[in-house]
Image (tube, rainbow, N blue to C red):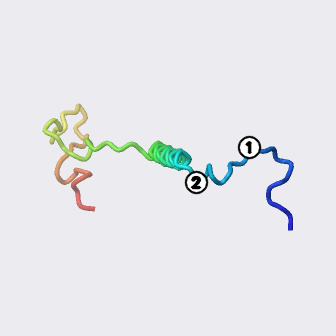
Amino acid sequence: MTSAIPASLPSGILFPEEVLHSEWFAVLATFVAINTLMYAALAVAKILPKVHPSAWIRTRNQRSETRSIHPDALAVTKDRDVLRSPR
């Protein structure tokens, strides 16, 4: 049976088992894991469309009637309100 590690590798490339079970290596591995999760979450958040919570809530500053020069322009009313109308 052949060895998985070639004999031509110089010493020091692979860590000995004591290093892999040391406390500082566990701390480093934890930091790398958290950093990877944060990077993945930021990448997913960048792909998703922006969320504008202010568009979900009607404020007093929104008119219930249109004041446009175009008489056919839509105004936000209770029956035309996209967020509150039954679908």
Tell me if 34 is positioned left or right of 81 in this view.
Answer: right
Residue at position x 46%, y 47% in the image: 41
Report which residue position mark 1 lands on. Answer: 12
Residue at position x 16%, y 51% in the image: 78
Query: Which image quarter holds the N terminus?
Result: bottom right
Q: Amino acid at mark 2?
A: His
How many numbered tags mark residues here? 2
Query: Which image quarter holds the C terminus?
Result: bottom left
Q: Nearer the viewer, residue 10 or 49?
A: 10
Report which residue position mark 2 lands on. Answer: 21
- Residue 6: image x %, image y %? 84, 54
Q: Nearer the viewer, residue 46 or 52?
A: 46
Residue at position x 22%, y 33% in the image: 68
- Residue 29: image x %, image y %? 54, 48
The residue sitting at the left extreme is 60
Tell me if 24 is positioned left or right of 52 in this view.
Answer: right
| Marked residue nearer the N-terminal end (2 or 1) | 1
Label 2 vs label 1: CA separation? 16 Å
Q: Nearer the viewer, residue 38 or 24?
A: 24
Q: Quadrant of residue 61?
A: top left
Q: Confirm or deny contact between disc 2 and disc 1 (CB under 8 A).
A: no
Secondary structure at numbered mark 1:
loop
Disc marking residue 83: none
- Residue 19: image x %, image y %? 62, 49
Q: Looking at the image, is 78 positioned above or below residue 62?
A: below
